Image (cartoon, helix red, strand yellow):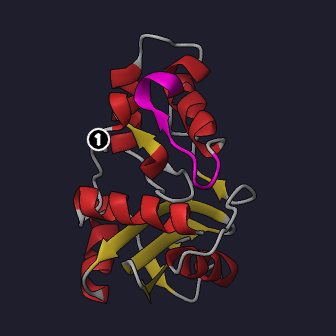
Amino acid sequence: MPLQACVFSTPLGWFGLVGQQRCVWRLVMGHRTAAEAWAGMQRHFAEETLAESDWYPALRKKLEEFSTGKRVSFDNIHVRTEHRTEFQRKVILATRAVGFGETVSYGELAARTGSRNAARAVGTVMANNDVPIIIPCHRVLASGGRIGGFSAPQGIDLKRRLLELEAQA
């Protein structure tokens, strides 16, 4: 069964979604064009066929609303994690528990997973997040409240925009 995929425009740039049934495999965001969003998705699925469709319109609507600054919950959205280690799954769960408008440090998140000294490992999990926003890695900051990194196309500028959107909601 081919993976389903769609791209759509938001105030934060072009987004792309990939998944099967109601399980999200990848979310790309912050691209300047639809073609860039498609290329961003296809880079990760070179061996897979991506079937362009109007996949998961309810999630697309939530992401569009989020990108305009509305308070939106993604708690009920299923994401693919079976390819992750136990530690990575713990970090993902802890990150998903960080509320809208809240932030935590990499070290705090490591402590929440029971691995107090694993801040760098948490950072690696965040850098390899397949579904930003749904797993809200933008809410994870470096020590002292520094912005840290963000691997989306617009980098830390997009991370700042996401944090500002949530602070204003």
Q: Secondary structure at mark 1?
A: loop
In the image, 56 versus 62, the foreground residue is: 62
Q: Which residues are magenta?
A: 99-108
Residue 166 image position (x, y, % from top left): 54, 63
Q: Tell me the residue at 57%/24% (across/down).
A: 86
Q: Quadrant of the C terminus?
A: bottom right
Residue 135 image position (x, y, % from top left): 54, 50
Q: Quadrant of the N terminus?
A: bottom right
Residue 124 covered by magenta stretch: no
Q: Tell me the residue at 53%/61% (across/down).
A: 167
For this view, does 148 lie left or right of residue 113?
left
Q: Tell me the residue at 60%/80% (across/down).
A: 65
- Label 1 amino acid? Gly
For this view, does 1 lie left or right of residue 143?
right
Q: Quadrant of residue 73?
A: bottom right
Q: Tell me the residue at 41%/73% (across/down).
A: 49
Q: Which residue is mark 1?
A: 148
**Can residue 45 be seen here?**
no
Name above or below for residue 116 compared with residue 69: above
For this view, does 142 lie left or right of residue 105?
left
Residue 106 covered by magenta stretch: yes
Name above or below for residue 123 compared with residue 29: above
